[in-house]
Amino acid sequence: MNKIDREFYHLIDILKNSTREQLLFQMKENFKLIPEEIQRSIEDYFKKFDYWGKLDFKNNEFEELERKVDSFTNHLDDYIWLYEHLNDYRSKKLLLAIMRNWYQYDFITLKETMESMYPDYFDLDIVKPDENEVIVDLGAYIGDTIYSYLDTYGEENYKRIYCYEITEEVFQYLEANTKKYENIICKRKAVSDKSEKLYIEESSVDASANTVKEKGEIYIDAVTLDEDIEEEITMIKMDIEGYEQKALLGSSRHIREEHPKLLISVYHNHEDIWKIPKMIEEILPGYTFYLRNHGGPIFPTEITLIAIYEER
C-alpha cells in the first residue's frame, strides 16, 4: 500500500466514523481556518455558479457544505469503488485531493494534481486516435475543443466530427470557426436521454455555462446520440453543465456496440465523480477509468473522466 492509498483509506475511516452532524461541524470549522480572502472568493464563486449549492457563512447558508456531507454520508462505498477502479496513481491522487478539498480545504494536494503537459481531455498517453475517428463534441461552444484536438493530433486524424451546441449566438461562432475544415457537422441541439423539448437557462456569467431545463422560454430540441447519429462513433466528449448523465444514457447503444473513447466532465455536482463511471460500467463492463485535473487549486473544477474500453 503506497502513501496515497494509506491517506485515502485514512480519510475514508474519518468520514465513516463521523456522524452527519460531526462532518458538517468539522467542515465549517475547517472553512473558518482558511484566509478570509479565500473564503470570500469561494463564496463568490458559488454565487456565480450554482451547481454545488449556496455558501454564505455570514447569513448561515450552508447548502454547499450540506451537499458534500450528504455525498460522503450516503456514498462512501461508491468513492471506494471508484478509487479501486482508477487505473493510475495520478487518478487516485486526484480523487484523494478532491475529497480532501471538500472536507478540509486542502489546496496543496489539489494543486499538485493540476495537469500542464497536455490540453484538457487529450492525454496523449491514454487517448490515441487515428484517421478513422468519428468524434462527437457535446458542449462544443465556439469550437475550442475541436481546435485543441486538431492541434494535439493533427488534421489528418479524424474522419468526421459532430459538434453540438445549444446557444444560438455561440452556435454562429462555432459554425464560422469550423467551416474551413472538412467533415465537421454542427448541430444546434441539446443531447439527453430522450427526444424532447427543453429550454435554455442562460448563465449570468458566461454563455459557456448555459444549461437546459424542462421549463422556460428559450426553446431547444433535445435528441439522443443513439437516434441522432447512425454511423459508428469512436470518441465522445461531454461538457454540458451537469447534463452529462442523461446524455450518457442517450448514448448507451453506441457505447455497447462501438466502445467509443469517453471524455466526460465530472465536476458539475457532488455525484458525477463516482456516478458516471458506475453508469458506464453498468452500460458496458470493460472500460478503464482515469481522472485528470485542468482546473485551479482552490476548488475542484475542470475535472475530466477518461474512459477507454479494454476487453476483460
Image (tube, rainbow, N blue to C red):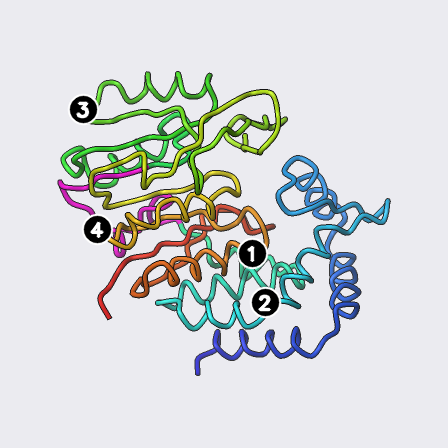
Label ID, residue 128: 4
Look at the picture and state if 184 lies above or below 15: above
**Chain-order first, disc 3 or disc 2:** 2
**Residues packed near mark 4 inside 10 Å, few (<14), some (14 to 19) or many (20 plus):** few
Q: Of tags 2 and 4, which is closer to the observer?
A: 2
Instruction: Tell me, yes or no, whether the highlighted magenta stretch contains residue 121.
Output: yes
Residue picked out by circle 3: 182
As shown in the figure, which amino acid type bears the numbered disc 3? Glu
Residue picked out by circle 1: 271
Q: Of tags 3 and 2, which is closer to the observer?
A: 2
Q: Kindly identify the residue that appears in the image at 70 percent across and 47 percent down.
A: 38
* Farthest bottom residue in view: 1
**Chain-order first, disc 1 or disc 4:** 4
Look at the picture and state if 171 lies above or below 260: above
As shown in the figure, which amino acid type bears the numbered disc 2? His
As shown in the figure, which amino acid type bears the numbered disc 4? Lys
Mark 2 lies on a secondary structure that is: helix
Q: Main secondary structure of the magenta part?
A: loop
Q: Kindly identify the residue that appears in the image at 16 percent across and 35 percent down.
A: 159
Q: Kindly identify the residue that appears in the image at 48 percent across and 24 percent down.
A: 220
Question: As rendered, which of 206 and 161 lies closer to the eye?
Answer: 161
Q: CA distance from mark 1 to mark 4?
A: 28 Å
**Chain-order first, disc 2 or disc 1:** 2
Q: CA distance from mark 3 to mark 2?
A: 45 Å
Q: Of tags 3 and 1, which is closer to the observer?
A: 1
Tell me whether circle 3 and circle 1 mark residues in contact (CB < 8 Å).
no
Tell me whether circle 4 and circle 3 mark residues in contact (CB < 8 Å).
no
Q: CA distance from mark 4 to mark 3?
A: 21 Å
Mark 1 lies on a secondary structure that is: loop
Residue picked out by circle 2: 75
Tell me whether circle 2 and circle 1 mark residues in contact (CB < 8 Å).
yes
Q: CA distance from mark 2 to mark 4?
A: 33 Å
